[in-house]
Image (cartoon, coloured by chain):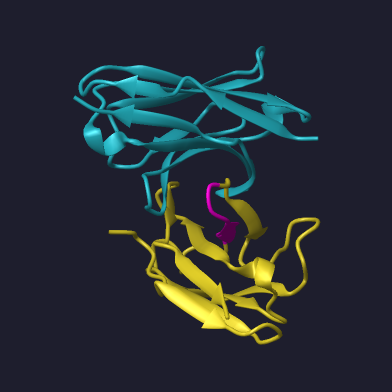
Amino acid sequence: QVHLVESGGGVVQPGRSLRLSCAASGFTFNTHGFHWVRQAPHKGLEWVALIWHDGSKTNYADSVKGRFTISRDDSRNTLYLQMNSLRVEDTAVYYCGRDLSYGAGSDWGQGTLVTVSP
Amino acid sequence: QPALIQPASVSGSPGQSITISCTGTSSDVGYYNYVSWYQQHPDKAPKLIIYDVYNRPSGVSNRFSGSKSGNTASLAISGLQTEDEADYYCSSFTSTTTLVFGGGTKLTVL
């Protein structure tokens, strides 16, 4: 069955960097697009970034544009989120999701917590 | 502020039906038929229950249904059950190939 496992979260100071990974299994990785979505403590879901199934297109929320980069390694069945210049307001649980149809995330990992604190 | 507007809370009794609205603009909800709905229980990952406005993923109860009119999408839940108590989020693909979410609606089953 479909399995997504995020890793790489932790506590980091403002201005520093962190790279999240999302290891996928149970399906053909290179035929799917993916999303990163985050959820700040006691807040709603916020879309962060997407990457097309072939990696040809990426897009970002305005709140992270220019600081975060989504990428994929099809040889490793792994999705990444490089997060630079982190801010306190980036504190959240980050989920990776497999795209079913133009933004519909059919499967999600368990999430990884990123805490940005001085 | 979330791009899509949802009521903060709705409630109903077991067996009843409820509807949750999701209002966007002509650049998101009104642009494509790519509206999704998610159910999220506390400390759990979101679960897709409706995609492309109307469609249910395999395994999702037919008590959940979606619709859209203009810039407003709706999620209906019939025959409310206690396990339906959760947060519900709408999302929409946009004309600029981004994704936007609603602020979420807390459903209480009384």
Which image quarter holds the N terminus of chain A?
A: top right
The tint of chain A in the picture is cyan
The reply to whether residue A83 is in sight is: no
The reply to whether residue B80 is in sight is: yes
What is the x, y in percent for residue A90? Answer: 30, 35
Q: Residue furthest top?
A: A75
> Is residue B36 part of the magenta span, yes or no?
yes
User: Is A91 in front, or is B72?
Assistant: A91
Apparent side of residue B14 relative to residue B100 in the rendered image (left or right): right
Please state the total of marks drawn on the protein image: 0
User: Is A118 in front, or is A88?
Assistant: A118
Which image quarter holds the C terminus of chain A?
A: top left
The tint of chain B in the picture is yellow
Please state the extent of the stretch shown in magenta in the rendering.
Answer: B34-43
Q: In the displayed structure, would residue A100 be above or below residue A116?
A: below
Q: In the displayed structure, would residue A24 be above or below residue A108?
A: above
What is the x, y in percent for residue A105? Answer: 60, 46
Apparent side of residue B39 relative to residue B64 in the rendered image (left or right): left
The residue located at (67%, 12%) in the rendering is A75
- Secondary structure mainly formed by the magenta segment: strand
> Is residue B107 part of the magenta span, yes or no?
no
Apparent side of residue A17 relative to residue A78 in the rendered image (left or right): left
What is the x, y in percent for residue B99? Answer: 45, 50
Q: Residue furthest front?
A: B110
Q: In the displayed structure, would residue B86 be above or below residue A16?
A: below
The residue located at (38%, 29%) in the rendering is A114
Q: Determine which quarter of the picture holds residue B18.
A: bottom right
The residue located at (71%, 32%) in the rendering is A3
The residue located at (59%, 68%) in the rendering is B85
What is the x, y in percent for residue B25? Answer: 37, 68
